Image: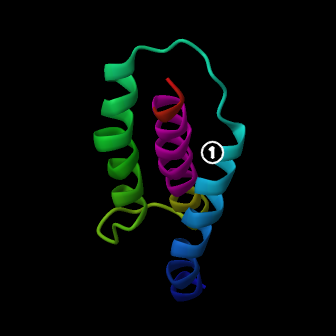
Amino acid sequence: MEDYTNKSLPYLIILFSVLGWILATGSGKAQWVRVADVIIYGPYLIYLSFQTNYSFSTAEKLFLAFLGATTITYNLRNFLKI
């Protein structure tokens, strides 16, 4: 099952990215926080979801990928709106 999940993870990241883009709203978060979320925080969460030397379960990997992808798309969409 682990091999199947690792192969489908990129597709799920794309799906989660679309969800983050759709769910983005125009709240007034500081721009530098958005940039840090897009450049540092989101990619790091996705990086962690691909790690094999940690004992993350499949659900935890999916959750990290979901958080990373939606963080990037949500904050990028709002950054581009302002």
In magenta segment, residue 69 = yes
Choose between 2 and 32: the one closer to the eye. Answer: 32
Choose between 65 and 25: the one closer to the eye. Answer: 25
Query: Could you tell me what secondary structure mostly forms the magenta stretch?
Result: helix
Q: Is residue 37 above or below residue 12?
A: above
Q: Which portion, as a residue range, is magenta? A: 63-79
Give the colouring mode of the picture: rainbow
Q: Which residue corresponds to mark 1?
A: 20
Horizontal and vertical percent for residue 4?
A: 58, 86
Image quadrant containing the N terminus: bottom right
In magenta segment, residue 30 = no
* Residue at the image point whose x is 34% and y is 66% from the top: 51
Horizontal and vertical percent for residue 43?
A: 35, 51
Q: Is residue 10 above or below residue 27?
A: below
* Residue at the image point whose x is 65% and y is 63% from the top: 15
Horizontal and vertical percent for residue 68?
A: 47, 48
Number of marks: 1
Specify whether 32 is left or right of 16: left
